[in-house]
Image (cartoon, rainbow, N blue to C red):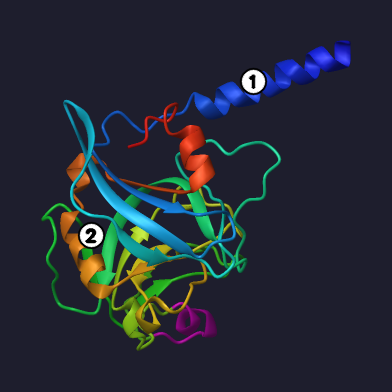
C-alpha cells in the first residue's frame, strides 16, 4: 500500500506539474499547429490573437509539413511529461510543445514585417551550427571573414536552397538553455515540391503563407507557436489556456 500511495502521489505531482503550465499571460499572439498523431508529417496551422473576449482566429487555417517521422516532445516553454521521448539531433521529427518565436532570416535585402521583428539578410558569413560538439551549437553567428574551416563552411546558412530563402526561428532548445544533441536549427521555412516533401524537423508551408505569417508576427505581442498532435492538443487545451 505504501508503494501504491507513493506511486499515486508521484503521478499526481507530475500531472499537476504538466497541467499547471499555461500560455504566458503577456502572449497575445499564438500560432497553433495540430497534427493527426505523433507519426504524422502533416499539420494544420491557425494564427490566433488574444483580446478581452479570449482567443480569436485572425483568418482561415492553412496546411504545412513537419518532420519526416512526425513529432516528438521538444524543449520550449512547456513542461515535458515524464518518461516520454524527446527531440534529438537527426531524428527527423518536429519538436512538439509551446515555443517562443524568434527573428527572421532571408536572402532578400528586406521583407514585409513588423518594425519590431529582427531580420537578417543572409550572406555567406551567416552561420548556424548543427554540430552538437560545437560551442556554438544551435546558435546564429555572423563572422567577419569568408568561411575557412570545415565547421564554418558546413554551418553556412546560405546554401543556394530556395526553400530556406525566408525563415522564421522557432525557439526550440534555444539560447541560453541549449542542451547539446537535443535538436537544432528549427525554423518555419518554404516547403519543397509544393508540400510534397516532409522535413528534417522544421515546419514548412507555401511561400505565400510563410510571407503572410512573417508579416503578421508582432514581437510586442509575445508570439508563441503551439505544435501538438490532436489528442494532446485537446488534453492540454483548457489547462494551458490554448486557443
Q: Give the answer, above or below, for where 205 lies relative to 15.
A: below
In the image, taking residue 138 as reference, residue 225 lies left or right, namely: left
Q: Examine the rendering and report whether any part of residue 103 can be seen.
A: yes
Q: State the SS at label 1.
A: helix
Q: Give residue 77's position: percent from left, percent from top.
A: 45, 40
Residue 151: say if magenta. Answer: yes
- Residue 91: mark: none
- Residue 13: mark: 1
Q: Give the answer, above or below, for where 79 lies relative to 41.
A: above
Q: State the SS at label 2.
A: helix
Q: Say which label, 1 or 2, has the lower sequence index.
A: 1
In the image, taking residue 53 as reference, residue 14 lies left or right, namely: right
Q: Which residues are magenta?
A: 147-155
Using a 10 Å C-alpha cutoff, classify the residue at mark 2 as few (fewer than 14 neighbours), some (14 to 19) or many (20 or more).
some
Q: Give residue 56's position: percent from left, percent from top.
A: 21, 39
Residue at 34% x, 77% y: name it. Answer: 164
In the image, taking residue 193 as reference, residue 8 lies left or right, namely: right
In 3D space, how far apart are the residues under numbered discs 1 and 2 (Cα atoms)? 38 Å
In the image, taking residue 3 as reference, residue 178 lies left or right, namely: left
Say which of 238 and 118 sits in front: 238
Q: Quadrant of the N terminus?
A: top right
Q: Quadrant of residue 92?
A: bottom right
Residue at 23% x, 60% y: name it. Answer: 213
Q: Quadrant of the C terminus?
A: top left
Say which of 58 and 110 sits in front: 58
- Residue 213: mark: 2
Amino acid at each position: 500500500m505504501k508503494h501504491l500511495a507513493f506511486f499515486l502521489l508521484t503521478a499526481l505531482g507530475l500531472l499537476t506539474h504538466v497541467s499547471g503550465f499555461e500560455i504566458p499571460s503577456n502572449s497575445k499572439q499564438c500560432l497553433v499547429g495540430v497534427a493527426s498523431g505523433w507519426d504524422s508529417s502533416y499539420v494544420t496551422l491557425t494564427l490566433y490573437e488574444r483580446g478581452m473576449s479570449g482567443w480569436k482566429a485572425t483568418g482561415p487555417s492553412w496546411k504545412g509539413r513537419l518532420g519526416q517521422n512526425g513529432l516528438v516532445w521538444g524543449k520550449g516553454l512547456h513542461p515535458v511529461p515524464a518518461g516520454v521521448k524527446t527531440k534529438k539531433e537527426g531524428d527527423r521529427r518536429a519538436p512538439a510543445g509551446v515555443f517562443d518565436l524568434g527573428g527572421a532570416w532571408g536572402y532578400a535585402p528586406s521583407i514585409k514585417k513588423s518594425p519590431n521583428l529582427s531580420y537578417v539578410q543572409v550572406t555567406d558569413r551567416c552561420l548556424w551550427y548543427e554540430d552538437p560538439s560545437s560551442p556554438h551549437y544551435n546558435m546564429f553567428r555572423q563572422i567577419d571573414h569568408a568561411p575557412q574551416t570545415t565547421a564554418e563552411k558546413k554551418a553556412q546558412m546560405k546554401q543556394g536552397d530556395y526553400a530556406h530563402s525566408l525563415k522564421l526561428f522557432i525557439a526550440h532548445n534555444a539560447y541560453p538553455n541549449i542542451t547539446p544533441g537535443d535538436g537544432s536549427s528549427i525554423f518555419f521555412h518554404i516547403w519543397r515540391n509544393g508540400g510534397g516533401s516532409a522535413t528534417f524537423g522544421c515546419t514548412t508551408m507555401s511561400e505565400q503563407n510563410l510571407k503572410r505569417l512573417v508579416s503578421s508576427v508582432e514581437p510586442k505581442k509575445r508570439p508563441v507557436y503551439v505544435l501538438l498532435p490532436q489528442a494532446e492538443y485537446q488534453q492540454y487545451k483548457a489547462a494551458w489556456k490554448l486557443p
